[in-house]
Image: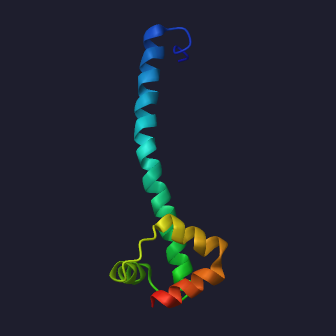
Amino acid sequence: MWRRKSNYAAAKEALLKAGQYAYRDRRAKKRTFRNLWILRLNAALRENGEKYSSFVKKLTDKKIALDRKVLSEMAMKFPEQFKKFVESVK
């Protein structure tokens, strides 16, 4: 059961497996954070009477290049400025 601390082959196998998990999860972390930013942004937009998908479409039409991370941070930390920004995009 606890072979990894005393058996070289088991320790090496555990190390290889840990490397695979680390590689996979570095990529998964990016997806997870993007999902979180979109959820936060959607919640803030719903409070301002706007849908996420239509808001993103309006941003691209007006060629406003702010990423989801910046927008969600603005919605959380500066809700009044975010509300003004949403109104200006409408």
Extreme-left residue of the structure: 61
Q: Position of residue 58 (x, y in %)?
A: 38, 84
Q: Residue at x 63, y 72 (%)?
A: 76
> What is the count of numbered marks?
0
Does the image show residue 49?
no
Is 52 above or below relative to 32? below
> In terms of depth relative to the viewer, which is nearer, 24 or 86?
86
Q: Residue at x 52, y 15 (%)?
A: 4
Q: Position of residue 77 (x, y in %)?
A: 66, 71
Q: Residue at x 46, y 62 (%)?
A: 35
Judged left or right of residue 3, residue 20 is left
Q: Dividing the picture into quarters, in which one does residue 59 lie?
A: bottom left
Q: Position of residue 9 (x, y in %)?
A: 43, 11
Does the image show residue 37?
yes
Q: How is the image coloured?
A: rainbow
Q: Position of residue 40 (x, y in %)?
A: 54, 70
The quadrant of the image that shows the C terminus is bottom left
Q: Dividing the picture into quarters, in which one does residue 51 lie?
A: bottom left
Is 56 above or below relative to 33? below
Q: Residue at x 51, y 85 (%)?
A: 86
Is 76 above or below relative to 32? below
